[in-house]
Amino acid sequence: MRTREEIEKFEGVVLASYAMLSKDSAGREYQEPASNNRTCYQRDRDRVVHSEAFRKLEYKTQVFVIFEGDYYRTRLTHTIEVAQIARTIGRNLGLNEDLIEAIALAHDLGHSPFGHAGESALDDIMTEAGLGFDHNFRSFEIVSRLEKRYPQFDGLNLTEEVLVGILKHETGYDHQGVVSKYRDKGPTLEAKVVDIADALAYLSHDIDDGLTSGCLRPDDMRVCALWQEASSRLSGQSFAENKEMFKYQAVRFLIDMQIRDLLEASQSRLLKLDFKSSKEVKDYNLKHINEPVISFSDGMKKERDNLQKCVEEKFYRHYRIVSMTEQAQRVIRTLFSTYLKNPMQLPYEIYPRNRKIDKKEQHEIICNYIAAMTDRMALNEYRKIFEPYQKI
């Protein structure tokens, strides 16, 4: 049986000089005795997996609402896929896989029901109140304040590297939240790997879901060089009677091509920059936000942008997706306005009755309550408003 100290020594031998070693962590806000058999990042990962917010991801939308079918990805399956891709990248680059996994599994904890449609509706409502809503910041709030699992502190008391990775997570859909304590903290390479794995996963797997739904057709993407290359690898193989197999293999090649390009381009930058420590990495990432080390080649970036544009036009703007988006946002807005009109409808543990609550705090309480809902819970609450005397 290995002790924590032995695992930490092993990291020092096998990981790259620029990797974030567990023994070098900046630590936790609240001091705790170290585990005998787990590194700090392994412990962080375990805390995320056992959290209530993580379990709820199973019933939160990626693109298709949960009731559209069992095949489509949920926030949970997307999160697992991001962690898997990120660990593959991290292992090839000699990075700390435990830190990668902890950040990856936590990166979407703050998502509201109904995916980006729900997030957009909450952001519009909260912006009108002078506040705003961002799922990255809410993920941070969940792990640092909202989860109530330990008597000694609120939240999960995760290490600084995981918290910074959550706060400064950014893809095409995301915006960095700002917490003064971590504003001048640069993210690790492990955190940047999660960023790129997220972008890679949602583009490739949204194509999978789009093709399965029929909202996206192979012909729609033939103008994209990346899709053409993936399809050409299947030439000579007959998929005329097995379109599902064609889809699986084409998406597989899409992911493989992107990862290979990413590894080659990133390794080239790492050799050039020649980082001697994780501290050098953090300093670089803080000062060079627009010059990521972990990134695709310029050619692949261009091909991905074209593919992303095609998916946005043909899939995200498909009338079925637009209709689902409108319905989802209607549910969120109705719930919010109903609770705001009479907050006493909220559970006792959610809305305190023993003190005066101003409008700002009312909005924050209601926003957190709705954001924590699964798709199913939000729809059930919506039905109670319009069908109050019917069995749900």
Image (cartoon, rainbow, N blue to C red):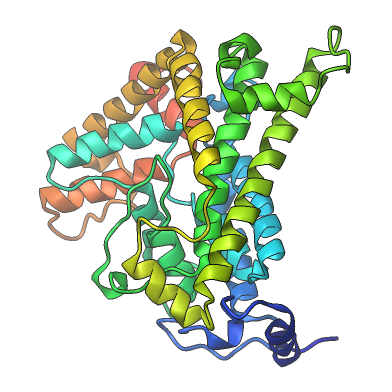
Count of residue discs: 0
Residue found at x 25% / y 56% = 352
Is residue 11 shown above or below 69?
below
Q: Position of residue 166 (x, y in %)?
A: 44, 60
The reply to whether residue 183 is visible in this rendering is: yes
Q: Position of residue 34 (x, y in %)?
A: 60, 89
Is residue 143 shown above or below 363?
below
The extreme front residue here reads 272
Residue found at x 71% / y 41% = 256
The reply to whether residue 388 is visible in this rendering is: no
Is residue 168 shown above or below 70?
below
- Please give left or right for residue 264 compared with residue 375 in the image: right
Query: For this rendering, which residue is in front, 348 or 125?
Result: 125
Q: Quadrant of residue 367?
A: top left
Q: Position of residue 182 (x, y in %)?
A: 32, 72
Dividing the image into 4 quarters, which one contains the N terminus?
bottom right
- Please give left or right for residue 119 compared with residue 312 in the image: left
Residue found at x 84% / y 13% = 239
Query: For this rendering, which residue is in front, 202 or 92?
Result: 92
- Please give left or right for residue 329 compared with residue 90 in the image: left
Residue found at x 78% / y 26% = 233
Q: Position of residue 248 (x, y in %)?
A: 76, 27
Query: For this rendering, which residue is in front, 350 or 228?
Result: 228
